[in-house]
Image (spheres, rainbow, N blue to C red):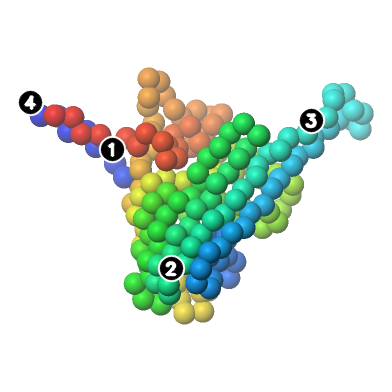
Amino acid sequence: MKKISLSVAVVFTMITVTKAQNSAEKIIAGNQGLHIGGYGQIDFNLPTRDGTIYKNGTLDVHRFITFIGYKFNEKASFVSEIEFEHVTEVYIEQAFLDYKIKDNLSVSAGLMLIPMGIQNLYHEPPTYNGVERTNVDKYIVPTTWRELGISLSGRSIDNSLNYQFMVVNGFNGYDDGGKFSGKSGLRGGSQKEQNPTLLFLI
């Protein structure tokens, strides 16, 4: 007996009316050649209660990000983003190829950010309000949420209307126990680029 197990791919569409660009969009829209950039975030937290300090403060190198991209020609670009968190953790946040089919239509494949929530796409300071990301984007929406997949995206000529259609890894809701909880929201099921649940058993 053959058994085929296949996770259901998550398909997203998103329409935004914006002129903002994140670093990946800037690389794709930029000049031909090598693009290097990045940013860092160091947090100092000093707990107080009723205006009185009751614990020692903590200093954390929360994240250090490096963007490396290459625009081969007017049609093809490569985008990557490497993230170091809390000095001890290293992640590949993005790594994808983008190919422009025509001026307002392109296809991308690789590890990409999911267009869910404003901060997931535009999480670079100072494009959001506050020192740290909001609790919704920190604990419920898995910012920064990225998955392996393929994307078809388009934009109006003046870049004021964008749309995106993606087929990516599905959520992993169970792995020797439930992955979702009220405390972690959707974050627990995000696979990032690790161990996709696309599985065939014969």
Q: Which mark is residue 104?
A: none
Asked whether the beta carbons under mark 3 and mark 2 sit within 8 Å of each other, the answer is no
Along the line of sight, which residue is nearer the eye, 182 or 46? 46
- For mark 3, what is the residue? 58
Residue at image point 66% right, 34% down: 86
Nearer to us: label 4 or label 2? 2
Q: CA distance from mark 3 to mark 2?
A: 44 Å
Residue at image point 74% right, 42% down: 42
**Disc 3 packing (10 Å; few <14; some 14–19; many ≥20):** few
Mark earlier in primary sequence (2, 1):
2
For residue 179, above or below residue 69: above
Q: Which mark is residue 198?
A: 1
Q: CA distance from mark 4 to mark 3?
A: 58 Å
For the residue marked with disc 2, what is the amino acid? Phe
Mark earlier in primary sequence (4, 2):
4
Q: Looking at this rendering, what residue extends furthest in the top direction? A: 176
**Disc 2 packing (10 Å; few <14; some 14–19; many ≥20):** some
For the residue marked with disc 4, what is the amino acid? Met
Nearer to us: label 4 or label 3? 3
For residue 9, above or below residue 103: above
User: Where's residue 148, x and y in %?
Assistant: 38, 46
Q: Looking at this rendering, what residue extends furthest in the bottom direction? A: 157
- For mark 4, what is the residue? 1
Q: Secondary structure at mark 2?
A: loop
- For mark 2, what is the residue? 72
User: Where's residue 163, x and y in %?
Assistant: 43, 65
Mark earlier in primary sequence (4, 3):
4
For residue 151, above or below residue 72: above
